[in-house]
Amino acid sequence: DAGVIQSPRHEVTEMGQEVTLRCKPISGHNSLFWYRQTMMRGLELLIYFNNNVPIDDSGMPEDRFSAKMPNASFSTLKIQPSEPRDSAVYFCASSLVGGQSPLHFGNGTRLTVT
Amino acid sequence: GENVEQHPSTLSVQEGDSAVIKCTYSDSASNYFPWYKQELGKRPQLIIDIRSNVGEKKDQRIAVTLNKTAKHFSLHITETQPEDSAVYFCAALPKLSFGAGTTVTVRA
């Protein structure tokens, strides 16, 4: 079991640029989650998918953020245009059954927007 | 998370002593309560969890208790060791919200 795989591990970009974060969930897991972690706000749920369908995106901060899950083994989180306040660690997590089983986190992507 | 409150925010204990972290939740539908440990620069990892049909669960030096009536649950770490130093998060599912975290420091 390779666990949840995220890429890139680190991303440094200038404000205004588009950023795409990628996630491969654990095979067989039906739910996928995107979280953002900052010192000020802790772990915030941005969006989660069940069987590739977005269930709750109320945590997505603005229209600049979008997430997709085209198939069971891949998801992206896109920020366009990026701003310095988007700097954070973004975690992807997956679980067998969303809300009823443990979340397995990826190693995260540390995003810095200058 | 907006419906999960966690206390204290920081906790310093002497090695060998116990540490207790408490979380309260507001959603009566919550039925699964995991605890995660996050070491500096690493991902959160599940250390123990409890479901609503159980009042207590123990795994070696770690235990979790649940009081559904009062809507709170607690993490207990006994015989603390330096490697227990980390940030601990509680969560109440199915809302998938996390507490703000508790930074635990174990003094040698």
Image (spheres, helix red, strand yellow):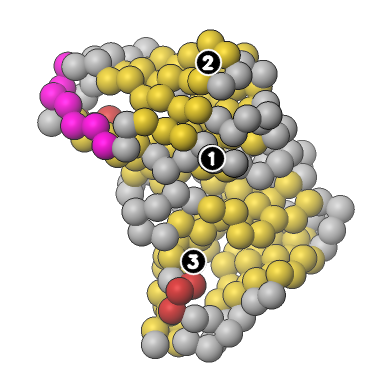
Q: To which residue does mark 1 refer?
A: A2
Within 10 Å of disc 3 (Cα), the crowding (few <14, some 14-19, many 20+) is: some
Q: Nearer the viewer, residue A22 or A1?
A: A1
**Amino acid at circle 1:** Ala
Tag 3 and tag 1, C-beta contact below 8 Å: no
**Element carrying mark 3:** loop
Q: Where residue A27 appears, x then y in whole percent?
A: 63, 30
Q: To which residue does mark 3 refer?
A: B8
CA distance for labels 1 and 2: 19 Å
Q: Residue at x 50, y 28 (%)?
A: A24
Asked whether residue A111 is in view, the answer is yes
**Amino acid at circle 3:** Pro
**Which of the two marks, 3 or 1, is nearer to us in this view?**
1
CA distance for labels 3 and 1: 34 Å
Task: Please tell me which of labels 1 and 2 falls first in the chain.
Answer: 1
Q: Residue furthest front?
A: A1
Q: Are marks 3 and 1 on the same chain?
A: no
Q: Nearer the viewer, residue A12 or B12?
A: A12
Q: Which residues are magenta?
A: A10-16
